[in-house]
Amino acid sequence: MKIPPVKGTRDFYPPQMAIRNWIIDGWKQVSVRNGFEEYDGPIFELLQMYQIKSGDEIVEQLFSLQDRGGRDLAIRPEITPTLARMVNQQINALPRPIKWFSVPRLCRAERPQKGRLREFFQWNVDIIGVDRSTADAEVILTTLDYLRMVGLTNRDVQAKISSRKLLAAVLRGVGIPEEKLNSLYAVLDKKAKLPAETFEAMLAEQVPDSNQARVIQDFMVARSVEDVESLVDFDDDIQNAIMNLKIVFHTLDLMGVSDYCVFDPGIVRGLAYYTGVVFEVHDVVGELRAICGGGRYDNLLRDFGGPRIPATGMGMGDAVLEILLAEKGLLERQVPKPQLEYYVTCADAIFTKDIFTITAKIRETGHSAAFNYGLWLEPSGTCEAPSLSKQLKDAAKQNASKCVIIGQEYADKRELVIKDMTKDQPSQAQVGVDQFLSDLT
RNA sequence: GUGAAAGUAGCUCAGUCGGUUAGAGCACCAGAUUGUGGUUCUGGGGGUCGCGGGUUCGAAUCCCGUCUUUCACCCCA
């Protein structure tokens, strides 16, 4: 009976595994050079962990299970609650700031689509314990540091930055009541996806007062932080939010990534827990869903039963990123191909035993080495070997960079022929076996 | 969860008024080549045409269901 793979999952054959490893290695490398330390948690948690900040609707998007004691568990759909739990648990012992990263494997029971699967990897970086905007800028820098490293330019991707605090202050400033903010966020978040007329209609439904609606519309098309200043009257909240955004942009400018960054009031982000700067990175063409998203969430640790400690962070999934990198031809060029260093061959079957001993010695020095499985050797000395031609063909197929040929020179002078397989023209040299092995170490 | 399109070999796809044992390229395996590979040539394996049911003398082809994928919604932590 043939059993199909599970909906929305991927099999990683060696070529795909090479891509996945290359992406994740890059994430880790950039995390470390930006000063983050790696952490991880369990792949499942108590179900209630995911009900705290998101409603029961989210529970339907979870893979959940019961253990034998009847506890409701869920496979993690995100790692931020785990992070909050871990930090809260040792809050008094951890030196601050806490700069942690993780590359968890996550599962969500959503309908699969392009760039969205039911199982995926997500790079998370978070800075906990810093309320200064410098931390927000650093999270964005780390994100862009990676994207730039893998070869994406500002013609490929763009970081769209806004502020939940500014948006809230503007909305309050025009007289929107506090309890309407969340439903209004949902509408504003859709602006980029909807035709202008549809958006206006939805906005009018939420904000019947046309003067209020106009100011909101004007805010939503602002192209810079400065544009916002001329739109609304200053109160302390607005001034504060604007200053924070200006600091973020200024810092990013000094860090040399301002050509990737743009102010975009349309970045609202789905859930309610963001409290300050929010950002998303999109492909410039705008054909894919967001490559990553993040922002400041100063209340989350408190919501998970800890003290009120400020935090800011970012999450980037592997699915959309991989699609974009493939489209730009950046995988082909950069993902390392499987490579064998030495392929040990013989010109005559009488050297079969020497193939085995020399191969093992090469491996012992830390280099990779292989031989042909057509070789045959019995303890009595009976042996056979495929032709040298076949062995070399096999070596080429395995992408070996060098071949070791054991032939008459070995019987006469203990010398090996080392053939360079990376050259188009024949290129080989003879070297004593002891010299060869000692050069390897 | 809602709506739409597609599914033929490992991959990309041919294959219609329904008619013998379902094809190609690439990939894979083997030979041509017994001290020198990547090219070339020759041959081979591999498909109950996604799965199940129906119509028919006869179904890859027509109809229904189902699964998967993709697209548009919901959602996007």
Image (cartoon, coloured by chain):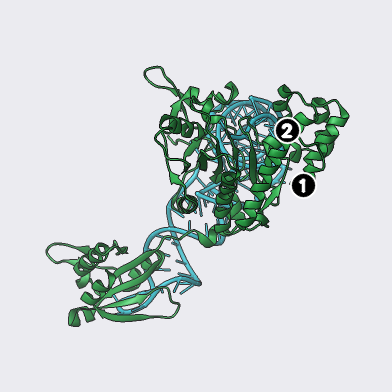
Q: Residue furthest left?
A: A380
Three-letter code, disc 2: Ala
The quarter of the rendered structure image containing the N terminus of chain A is top left
Task: Chain letter for mark 2, please.
Answer: A
Q: Which mark is residue A169?
A: 2
Task: Chain letter for mark 1, please.
Answer: A
Q: Residue furthest right?
A: A210
User: What is the x, y in percent for residue A204?
Assistant: 83, 28
The tint of chain A in the picture is: green
Q: Which mark is residue A226?
A: 1
The tint of chain B in the picture is: cyan
Q: Secondary structure at mark 2?
A: helix
Name which residue lies at 36% across and 67% down: A395
Question: Seen in the image, is A210 located left or right of residue B29?
Answer: right
Residue B58 position (above or below residue B20):
above
Name which residue lies at 58% across and 51% down: A141
Name which residue lies at 77% across and 47% down: A226
Residue at mark 2 shares a chain with residue at mark 1:
yes
Three-letter code, disc 1: Glu
